[in-house]
Amino acid sequence: MSASLFKSAMTATRKVLVTGGARGIGKAIADRFRKSGYTVLTPSRSEVDLSDLSAVQVFASGEAASGIDILVNNAGENKPLRLEEIEPADLQRILTVNVAAAFLLARYLGVRMAERGWGRIVNISSVYSMVSRERRSMYSTSKSALNGLTRALAVELGPRNVLVNSVCPGFVDTDLTRQNNTPEEIANLCALVPLRRLATVQEVADFAYFLGSEENTYVTGQSLAIDGGFLSQ
């Protein structure tokens, strides 16, 4: 069998789990893997509620998540509040969905990958894990923690051929971005970026795909920005 045919056969047997895969960046990532022949699972909230760690544990340890080779922790929440407006329940939910659920999925699925001797974990973080702004204390805290998890997993799982990385998008042109910002506000965001435009979901998906696929053979433990140069200023 030629090398290209062997790679195609291996790809066809790989299973990918993408959380938050129904829209935006998550959907684009799921579609990108499907386009390349992977089997992709995008569980709905009714299948696994990421705000309920007991439900996450049941899902991750169950038959539905068996045989996962590539985990993309994309689902996340952001509730912009001033510090004095934050209630303990707000903080608990953000940390649960953005960090603890990703941690548990990696704990169960990553161990199985390691046992099989191959795996990839891609955590979708944010440039706000590296810088921040007003009303983003919970979000920045959670995404910074996700980057820390990425480094720790890369060290622990690397010897068993499981590569773990974070993707840190900047401003991305999603339906949610368009809903939450006026055309003037979108223009202001673009002005903050050296490339003077928002990222497309496809650009972020292609980046995540590389890190999660067989094409990535040596990049691990990194938190990589895809931000049009925003962090360079």
Image (cartoon, rainbow, N blue to C red):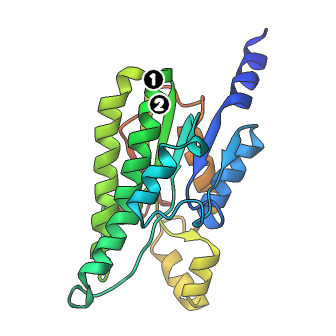
Q: Residues within 10 Å of mark 2 (few under 14, many from 20)?
A: some
**Mark carried by residue 42:** none
Local crowd size for mark 1, using a 10 Å CA cut-off: few (<14), some (14–19), many (≥20) = some
Q: Secondary structure at mark 1?
A: helix
Residue shown at the point (59%, 60%) measured from the top left: 47
* Residue 225 visible in the current orientation: no
The reply to whether callout 1 and callout 2 are in contact (CB within 8 Å) is yes
Residue plotted at (55% across, 38% down)? 70
- Residue situated in front as seen by the camera: 215 or 145: 145
- State the image coordinates of residue 170 (x, y, percent, origin top left): 47, 64
- Image quarter (top left, top right, bottom left or bottom right) of the C terminus: bottom left
* Amino acid of disc 1: Glu
For disc 2, the marked residue is 112
Mark 2 falls on what kind of element?
helix
How far separated are the C-alphas under marks 1 and 2? 5 Å
- Residue most toward the top? 1
Residue that mark 1 sits on: 115
Relative side of 222 to 7, left or right: left
Looking at the picture, how far across and down is residue 129, in whole percent?
Answer: 33, 61
- In this view of the protein, which residue sits in the foreground, 83 or 177? 83
| Residue 58 higher or lower than 38, as above or below | below
Closer to the camera, 18 or 215?
18
Q: Quadrant of the N terminus?
A: top right
- Amino acid type, residue under disc 2 in the picture: Arg
Would you place residue 86 above or below residue 175 in this image? below
Q: Position of residue 100 (x, y in %)?
A: 34, 57
Q: Quadrant of residue 183?
A: bottom right
